[in-house]
Image (cartoon, helix red, strand yellow):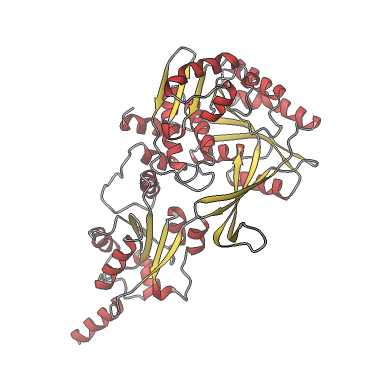
Amino acid sequence: MQNDELIDLVEGLGTPRVLIVGDLILDRYITGDVRRISPEAPIAVLAAQHDELRLGGAGNVCANLCSMDARVELISVVGDDVLGRRMVSMLAELEIGNAGVEVEHERQTTEKTRFVSGVNQMLRVDWEETRPLEPDSLLRLFARLPKSIAAADAVILSDYGKGLLTDDVIAAVVKIARENGVPVLVDPKGNDYSRYRGATLVTPNRKEAEEALGRSLEQLSDLPAAGDKLMEVAELDAVVITLGPEGIYWRTKAGEDWRTPTEAKKVFDVVGAGDTVIAHIALGLGAGLKLGAAVELANHAAGIVVGRAGAAAVTRAELLAAVGRRRVGGGKVLNSEGGELEAQIAEWRSEGRRIVFTNGCFDVLHAGHVQYLRYARSCGERLIVGLNDDASVARLKGPTRPVNSLGDRKLVLAALEMVDAVVDFGEDTPKNVIERITPDVLVKGEDWRDKGVVGSEWVEKHGGRVVLAPLLEGRSTTAILAKANEAGA
């Protein structure tokens, strides 16, 4: 499809209602650096720096849908423990109610802990308990299904094999959905796809499809027969097979099929990519799109998330950028509102660009600024300059500043060849804009060494680094203005 067509599809998605029934997982990421080998055993020692919790499993599917402005309902289960309560709290932050999330006293909330150094996972530790729901929880789930499914535009079964999706639960969901004309999409687990009989489609990756079929799918020419067999076994309307660097293949019972080439420019982490694919296909089908169009949008979304660390989600602005949208005004000056900044960031990330951020007032531009900005640009491939607005400059520098208005300062910075984008902010610090961008590299002058660089913890927590740039001695806006005042006197 052409870019204009894809843009129209994204802008016309509306806010479909999607029901997710599946296993919740709490993903923990412990990140740091490896500097030595343990004297106790021949293993690396991770000097831990950050500990982050994210929604995984069905929770990551929810996060992907919420970021695309879908209306989301979740049916799942957690343990009556600290992690379970944290999970419910994280869902509430996404404005997903916990009415459909059963809390069981004897159940352990599933947690996956990943130890990461740089871009490499060193070890994963799983804490889990796999068993069906307790009888009372199961009765409440069955009672909830008819109303929840009837209100949905699409249903996702997110099966991670933790016990929620028993054969009886799957059969009940599929039966009620069929009666209401609601598509059921399955992220499958195991090699027996007959248990998903009657669903609309399944979304295995290549390895999962091979395990279900009991044979390898080395050639693309093997895929049509594989799709037909999976549809026959599970009485499906369609099958979608994700192929990693070779894109996504889909086939319908009517014999329609297509392979959408990969959109990933740079693969950082494939964790959660399958969640993104099924979430976006469900969103598209729920909005009334044909399967091919929904798969193409899902492919673009997956191309964005594999360029990020850990389970991640995509916004509509980011997806618009990925399918070819450009800034309305063109040029380098970005509007800080309306998603324009996020859209540009998404476009660069989809291209695998290393993004650098720095900030300042840049009131009277001088040689020190030019050297500083050139150094910042050398730390990556795209440089974004955050610019204090006029009120912010006045608070920081005094009532006689700025000398040049915000509009003029934007224009001058945008004219510099080493600057790729300029965005203004009204706060005294760039904390908020840094968190919106999450740059790969944060640059400040070396005079900030002992002051503490705003945003450094956020950037390092998300796998980036902070660089202190050398300064050109004897150059400053204050000195230039003082000299001008002396000359005028």
The image quarter containing residue 140 is top right
Q: Residue at 29% of width from left, 64% of height from top?
A: 374
Q: Residue at 54% of width from left, 44% of height from top?
A: 311
Quadrant showing the C terminus: bottom left
Answer whether residue 124 is visible to the viewer in this image: yes
Residue 376's place in the image compared with 172, above or below, is below
Count of numbered marks: 0
Q: Position of residue 196 (x, y in %)?
A: 63, 21
Q: Is residue 397 left or right of residue 90?
A: left
Along the line of sight, the residue nearer the viewer: 281 or 433: 281
Q: Is residue 450 left or right of residue 356?
A: right
The image quarter containing residue 149 is top right
Along the line of sight, the residue nearer the viewer: 113 or 282: 113
Answer whether residue 153 is visible to the viewer in this image: no
Q: Position of residue 425 (x, y in %)?
A: 39, 60
Outermost residue toward the top in this view: 254
Residue 68's place in the image compared with 369, above or below, is above
Q: Position of residue 24 (x, y in %)?
A: 65, 39
Q: Residue at 37% of width from left, 58% of height from top?
A: 356
Q: Position of residue 31 (x, y in %)?
A: 56, 56
Q: Is residue 418 left or right of residue 171?
A: left
Q: Residue at 59% of width from left, 23% of height from top?
A: 212
The image quarter containing residue 394 is bottom left
Residue 269's place in the image compared with 384, above or below, is above
Residue 18's place in the image compared with 304, above or below, is above
